Image (tube, rainbow, N blue to C red):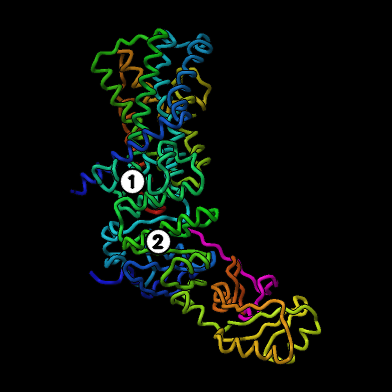
Amino acid sequence: MSTASTALGDSAIMLRRNFRHTVRNPVTVFNAILFPIVMMLMFVYVFGGAFKVPGSYVDYAVPGLIVMAITYGLGPTAASVNDDMTKGIINRFKTMDVSRGAVLTGHVVATTVRALIAVGAIIGVGFAMGFRSHGSALDWLAALGLVLLLAFATSWLTVAMGLSAKSVESAGLATVPLIMLPFLSSAFVPAATMKTGVKQFAEYQPFTPIIEVLRGLLSGGHVSTSHTVQALAWCVGFALLGYVWAVSTFKKRA
Amino acid sequence: MENTAIAVTGLRKTYGDKVVLDGIGFEVARGSVFSMLGPNGAGKTTTVNVLTTLLKADAGTVRVAGHDVAAQTAKVRSAIGVTGQFAAVDELLTGRENLRMMADLKRIRPAAPLVSRLLERFELSEAADKQASTYSGGMRRKLDLAMTLVGSPQIIFLDEPTTGLDPRSRRTMWDIVRELVAEGTTIFLTTQYLEEADQLADRIAVLDGGRIVAEGTAEELKRQIPGTHVRLKFATLAELDSAARVLDTGTRDEAELTLRVPSDGTSRSLRALLDRLDEYSLNSEEFSVHTPDLDDVFLALTGHATTDTATENAPAANAAPAAPAANVTVTTEEN
């Protein structure tokens, strides 16, 4: 068997393992799917009325909630990567000549798939709550591409955090910034309405351009080129940083 | 194929300025059980980690299954199975799924018959479809070992396989090890239990402070220390006193009313001793012959008992385990 097909086969076995973990550990499912939906209900039905946004609030909030759905699923990944490293199982794989990246790839792919399911759920519930999109099929495809890229990028970053954390608890905590950042972006209110300082932060942080691009695509409106470039740059940056950090930490620890 | 399963020479490993393995060397014959015996912090796990490709040695050569661990890592890995100190099972998967995963990773098809066979052999069939997190410590160890056996590796490393197990599970583990050896598997076993090494191993290496202080069969090790003696217990102090006068090589213990007389343990010397007692009309209430066990061996070889503490310059013969040692350094193995 060639090295590449061995690596692919090993990754598939690890992916199956991670999917089983997701199904067996209800907290993971809760984090990835239920919590963003609860947030959505709160923002649309409770706070939303008080926010001044262009158009209906649910239309405004869905893109931000999509991003939250992605970041909320990250905590359990960091914890389970750390768990793998600190318990004996990783040594078992290493003494068996399982291809090096398979364990990490399994986590990244499982997290990405979980994120996609959560995003699907958010969009579905969004539609039920009155969300309407004027985007074309091409816009939706582009939005899906961005969601996929963001999920993939943040998954690698999370895997790296899980690898370098000292304990399972601190691994889970390491992803908190990624979960909190969308709150300080244009996810729920336009950045322009925020106080000075917070406003600048919101404008320049990674999630604002990503959310703005998604919003543009889903509403079928204008998508600014500078936002698109920034969004893609952040995603690719996250992915590269996460990958390099994860692989070097894995080599050191494993 | 050569007759040596594992060959190690001049193996050194240091962490910072702490020397963990100070140039150890040994050979393990194919199909035999080799036991590395030593207290915590002696370097046992480090040795296992180097031999199983998890750690790089600082110096020395290590050949496992005929392959160099540093240069032919993949070949070594395909020949070995490792059961570490902490059960390496996936707790969220069931026993069956854990074994299935191992079979998949080793590309064994079809996997189901092998998996069922292993579950049966390790008496895990009933719990096969329960998550490993619900297993008892003994069951986890069994599952762990079953996972190690997937693919029938030629050489199996067991790092303290019975630490923390109840006596019954320990016996089961021993039986499994004996079965494996009967099938021709080579076993490298580390343990802090002298009895375990005595029971299972063909050869024993005593590791202390990163050095092998003795190596040989259990019998050879026991022979290295003179210490077979006859223990006589008397009813009264007066009888003990007169016995001590007659048998002047003995050591008296007034509290216990016993006399320890060195002896080579042969029937002739025992008869001579008994005759002498008879001659003076002395009668001991109890009479027993003691051959040193591995605990005595360990004490004599390392100058300290098989505990977590290492005592420096303690006189070998009378370092009573209860007596507080003047110079105690505690070392723990950390990986």
Graded by Cα atoms within 10 Å as few (under 14), some (14 to 19) or many (20 or more), the crowding at tag 1 reads few
Q: Mark 1 belongs to which amino acid?
A: Arg
Graded by Cα atoms within 10 Å as few (under 14), some (14 to 19) or many (20 or more), the crowding at tag 2 reads some
Are the residues at dot 1 and dot 2 in contact (C-beta closer than 8 Å)? no
Please indicate, yes or no, whether residue A12 appears anywhere in the rendered image.
yes
| Residue ID at (35%, 9%) | A132
Q: Mark 2 belongs to which amino acid?
A: Arg
Residue B16 in the figure: left or right of residue B273: left
Q: Is residue B6 magenta?
A: no
Residues A85 and B40: in front is B40
Which dot marks residue B117? 1
Numbered circles on residues, count: 2
Q: Which residue is mark 2?
A: B178
| Whole-number angstrom distance, CA of label 1 to CA of label 2 | 18 Å
Residues A196 and B166: in front is B166
Residues B243 and A14: in front is B243
Both on one chain, marks 1 and 2? yes
Placement of A35 over or under A3, stated as above or below: above
Place of residue B251 in the rendered image (x, y in percent of width and height, measured from the top left): 70, 85
Question: Residue A19 lies in what quarter of the image?
Answer: top left
Which dot marks residue B297? none
Placement of B286 over or under A124, stated as above or below: below
Placement of A215 over or under B253, stated as above or below: above
Q: Main secondary structure of the magenta part?
A: loop
| Residue ID at (40%, 16%) | A62
The secondary element bearing badge 2 is classed as helix
Q: Numbered disc 1: what chain?
A: B
Place of residue B43 in the rendered image (x, y in percent of width and height, measured from the top left): 48, 66
The span shown in magenta is B314-335
Residues A130 and B284: in front is B284
